Amino acid sequence: MSGHSKWHSIKHKKAVVDARRGQHFTKLARAITVAAREGGGDPEGNPALALAVQKARDASMPKDNIERAIAKGTGEGVDADQIETVIYEGYGPGGVALLIEALTDNRNRTGADVRHILSKNGGNLGEPGSVSYLFDKRGVIVVDAGRYDEDDLIGAIDAGAEDISRDDDVFEIVTGPGDLSAVRGALAQTGVEIDSADVTQRPKSRVPVQESDAPKLIKLIDALEESDDVSAVHANFDVDADVLERIAS
């Protein structure tokens, strides 16, 4: 029984609660600003911006905050050009590969912070290219399998989904990066509520992690995600879903 998709669902629910407390609004706004800078301020013609805005809406970010973040990215703010995307590669407990995405205005500060978190929590920083080949960029939608069955998800296939699989008590719907919004929209039209939807670095294969290593690994990932500059952490681990539930509780 794999717990990787279950972990995505748990993370999403936790992030929404944290964001509503105001803890993650800065990260969400920064992602919107960078997406607007790189692809323009119209979500209709900028899939990355549309995704960033949707994530902000999912977290109940006020409309004014979203609009201000877009304005910064399209030239009304002086901060946008100072923010850059940086990818760090490394390893966690159990030999798990980590891809760490950051949005930062100070590469040296962020690099030192990431290195410190890794070393403090049983991980280590790798060279560029050391683990990135283990991942493929894909859209991933997670749906509660307790509420829906495969027949309810047929619209996702019609809208361009590449694969639908059941992982314990959730369905994982995989799309091309550019098809995520269309597939999500198709599910919404049929009344299917989603647990999470994101463009992510999907592991080509997964490393089984022993129960004794799982808490250390999740603690490391949580610490990385709590860093102000880290926007996403991708990992190729496989942990029993029951273990993840115990860790999350």
Image (cartoon, helix red, strand yellow):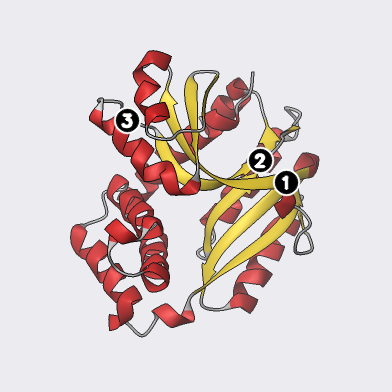
Image vertical order of residue 147 relative to residue 212, above or below: above
Q: Residues within 10 Å of mark 3 (few under 14, many from 20)?
A: many
The residue carrying mark 2 is 203
- Number of numbered labels in the structure image: 3
Image vertical order of residue 106 relative to residue 195, above or below: below
- Residue 220 place in picture, x, y as percent: 65, 48
Q: Nearer the viewer, residue 144 or 172?
A: 172
Q: Position of 63 compared to 78: left or right?
A: left
Q: Secondary structure at mark 2?
A: strand
Q: Position of 113 compared to 8: left or right?
A: right
Image vertical order of residue 151 relative to residue 138, above or below: above
- Residue 189 place in picture, x, y as percent: 24, 30
- Residue 235 place in picture, x, y as percent: 65, 44
Q: CA distance from mark 2 to mark 1?
A: 6 Å
- Residue 151 place in picture, x, y as percent: 38, 14
Q: Nearer the viewer, residue 226 or 191?
A: 191
Residue drawn at point x = 42 percent, y = 16 percent: 150
Q: Tell me which label, 2 or 1, sits earlier in the chain.
A: 1
Are the two marked residues, 2 and 1, in contact with CB atoms closer than 8 angstroms?
Answer: yes
Q: CA distance from mark 3 to mark 1?
A: 29 Å
* Tag 3: amino acid: Leu
Q: Secondary structure at mark 1?
A: helix
Residue drawn at point x = 42 percent, y = 43 percent: 179
Residue drawn at point x = 38 percent, y = 48 percent: 18
Mark identifier at residue 134: 1
* Tag 1: amino acid: Leu
Tag nearer the camera, 2 or 3: 3
Mark identifier at residue 230: none
